[in-house]
Structure formats: C-alpha cells, structure tokens
Amino acid sequence: MIVQTVVLGLIITVFLLWRLRASNGKQKRKAVFLVGPAEAGKTSLFSQLVYGTAAPTVTSTAPNRGCWKSEDGELTIVDLPGHPKAQDMLKSEFNNNTLSPSAVVFVINSATIDRDVHSVALMYLNVLLECYKAKVHRVLIACNKFDLFTAVPANQAFKLLQNELDNIIKLQDAQVESISAQDERLWDSFLNSLDSFHVEAISGSATKGTGLDKWKAWIQFKLFHL
Ligand SMILES: Nc1nc2c(ncn2[C@@H]2O[C@H](COP(=O)(O)OP(=O)(O)OP(=O)(O)O)[C@@H](O)[C@H]2O)c(=O)[nH]1
Ligand SMILES: [Mg+2]
C-alpha cells in the first residue's frame, strides 16, 4: 500500500512538473500597441499593417487586434480607441497574458499638434507611465497626417510634445506631496527611468502610405534586430 502511494505521488509530481514546463515554454506573441489621441489615424495605420490598405474607418470604441506578417516575423498589432474614456484599456491590454508587450506606437496628428499639445502630452505621460509599469521601453511617435498643409515636421512635433511633457511633469512634481506614499514612490522611480525610454519621432501618412516603410522598419528593427 505504501509503495503504491509513493508511486502515485511520483506520477502526479512528474505530471505537474511537465505541465508547468509546457505552459512556461509557450511563446507569447510579440505585440505592438497603437495608442494616441482620437482621430489621429491609429485604425488607418492598423489597417495598413494588417490588411495592407487604409480602409475607411469609424471611431473606435474597443481594441482591434490583428496579425502583421512582417518580413522578420509575425506580430500582433493592437489598435486602441483614442477617446479619453478608453485610457484604461492600455493597462488591461498590457495585462493580457497571451501577448508579450514589446513596443508602443504613439500616433499623433502632426497637423494639429501645435494646438492640441497640452491634451496630447497629458495622454503621452499616461502612456509612458503604463509603459514603465509594463516594462515597455520602445516608443515610436508616429507623426501622422503629414500630407496635410498645416503639418509640422517630426522633430518639431516631438520638441513641442517633449516641452509640454516637461512642463506637466514639473507641475505634477510640485503636487507630489498630495499623492499617496505608494504613488509617490512609483512617480519618483518613473521619473528616474525616463532616460531609459527609446523614443523616436517619424513623420508619415497612414492613408497615403508615405512614411509607412519607415514606421515598419522602426518596428521590425526594434523588435527583431536589437
Ligand atoms: N489626411 C489624412 N487623413 C488621415 C490620415 N490618417 C487617418 N486619416 C483620417 O483621419 C480620420 C481618423 O482616422 P482613424 O484611423 O479612424 O483615427 P483613430 O486614431 O483610429 O481614431 P479613434 O478610433 O477615434 O481613436 C479618418 O477620416 C481617416 O481617413 C492621414 O495620414 N492623412
Ligand atoms: Mg480608431
């Protein structure tokens, strides 16, 4: 009886160890997240990457997920709605345990960034904070709608965004005493990590397809060649 119990125990242990190894070994698919303000062109870019064409879009209210078969490998592309009400969706998508969050593309409208810079920078800050928590350090700022007459070049859009982000951080820093100790610790470590983000801004047009190759090259290089 004792021998039988020991053998049964051994069989169960071996089975549990095998299951554990099998689940750990399962490769999660690398995922790139398209985020940014409403109407910036995220779904148009998603459509270009996943279907190879910029199909007409409507305002997104839920995430779109699709597969981009790039020359270097397959990636999951997640397109998130830009409405402020949907800001929490990035956090839940990052926590989706079938995906490995690898990079974020922050899509902005480069024809309106000079007017919208405050709200866009607030959203950018929130995105960077979520990226920090999820250990995602690669961020492409896709300066979309570069085909429009009022569009500013990527370096100018990036400078505007970065200056506004610095202003918001200074203000937030001054208010840091009013937030809880736990949040304060997170905030401080986030600020110390800002230099570890790899951020690049590149212009293009998701509907016209110009600059698309540069965005694709950035993603492929960061995800498959670094
Ligand atoms: N001129 C121009 N229009 C664009 C470009 N990219 C997108 N659009 C247009 O901008 C509008 C919004 O595009 P979407 O791709 O739906 O924007 P979105 O960021 O997904 O918007 P939400 O889902 O509301 O967050 C659509 O009418 C697009 O055709 C572009 O590069 N140039
Ligand atoms: Mg959309």
Image (cartoon, rainbow, N blue to C red):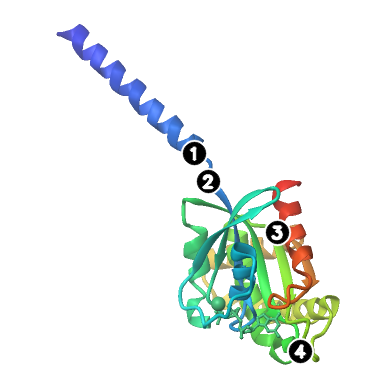
Give the distance between the C-alpha atoms of the residues marked 2 and 4, in whole angstroms: 39 Å
Foreground: 20 or 162? 20
The quadrant in which the N terminus is found is: top left
Name the mark nearer the viewer: 2 or 3.
2
Residue 187 shows in the view: no
Tag 3 residue:
138
How many numbered marks, from 0 up? 4
Tag 4 residue:
114
| Label 1–label 2 contact, CB within 8 A | yes
Helix, strand or loop under label 4: helix
Helix, strand or loop under label 1: loop
Q: Position of residue 166 (x, y in %)?
A: 75, 77
Give the distance between the C-alpha atoms of the residues marked 2 and 3, in whole angstroms: 18 Å
Residue at the location (66% across, 82% down)?
Answer: 120
Three-letter residue code for mark 2: Lys
In the shown orientation, is residue 82 left or right of residue 166? left
The mark nearer the N terminus, 2 or 4, is 2
The mark nearer the N terminus, 4 or 3, is 4
In the shown orientation, is residue 40 left or right of residue 202? left
Q: Position of residue 192 (x, y in %)?
A: 71, 61
Residue 136 shows in the view: yes
The mark nearer the N terminus, 2 or 3, is 2
Tag 1 residue:
26
Quarter of the picture for ligand 1? bottom right
Helix, strand or loop under label 3: strand
